Amino acid sequence: MNDELWNLMPMDSSLNSSKSNNLPRWDPFFQTFAENQFQMYDLMQRSDHIRKLYEGCYRDNLHSLWAGQELYRPGNRREEFIHILEKNMMPVYESARRQGYEVWNYI
């Protein structure tokens, strides 16, 4: 139940429905997710048009301080970006698991 930019991934609506409120398996999902997020970040750094779109929506969709201060700051290399994302997402994922969210085993 988190619609912040760092937690969004394009997905077919039927897949999203089958996922329901379950969590994807961390492996292999995270790597694909992180690559997708980095592509958006990279486009944002290289395109003024994409950057302006980001700036138009980040106030409503970016409430995590770490994302604004670390993740989306200019100059992150791919490895840095993915490390920051994982370092901050893993505790959220683990907390959801402890709260009883089940893992979606889509094959």
Image: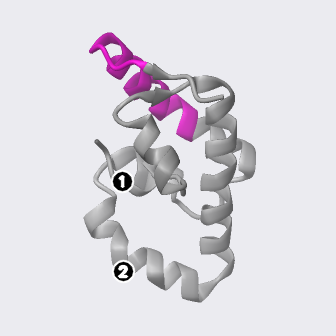
In the picture of the structure, the residue carrying the numbered disc 2 is 56
Tell me the number on the disc at residue 4: 1
Residue type, numbered disc 1: Glu
Indicate which disc residue 31 carries: none
Q: Percent x, y for residue 58?
A: 35, 68
Q: Residue at x 30, y 13 (%)?
A: 100
Can residue 70 be seen? no
- Labelled pair 2, 1 in contact (Cβ < 8 Å): no
Q: Whole-percent x and y of residue 20?
A: 37, 37
- Vertical arrangement, residue 81 with respect to residue 92, above or below: below
Residue 75 found in image quarter: bottom right
Is residue 92 rendered magenta in the image? Answer: yes
Mark 2 falls on what kind of element? helix
Give the residue type that dot 2 points to.
Gly
Q: Point out the stretch of residues depicted in magenta.
A: 85-102
Vertical order, 71 against 54 (above or below): above
| Magenta stretch secondary structure, dominant | helix
* Of 9 and 84, the residue lying toward us: 9
Task: List x then y, in percent, for residue 87.
Answer: 53, 30
Look at the image and tell me in which quarter the C terminus lies: top right
Q: Residue at x 56, y 39 (%)?
A: 84
Q: Nearer the viewer, residue 45 or 101?
A: 101
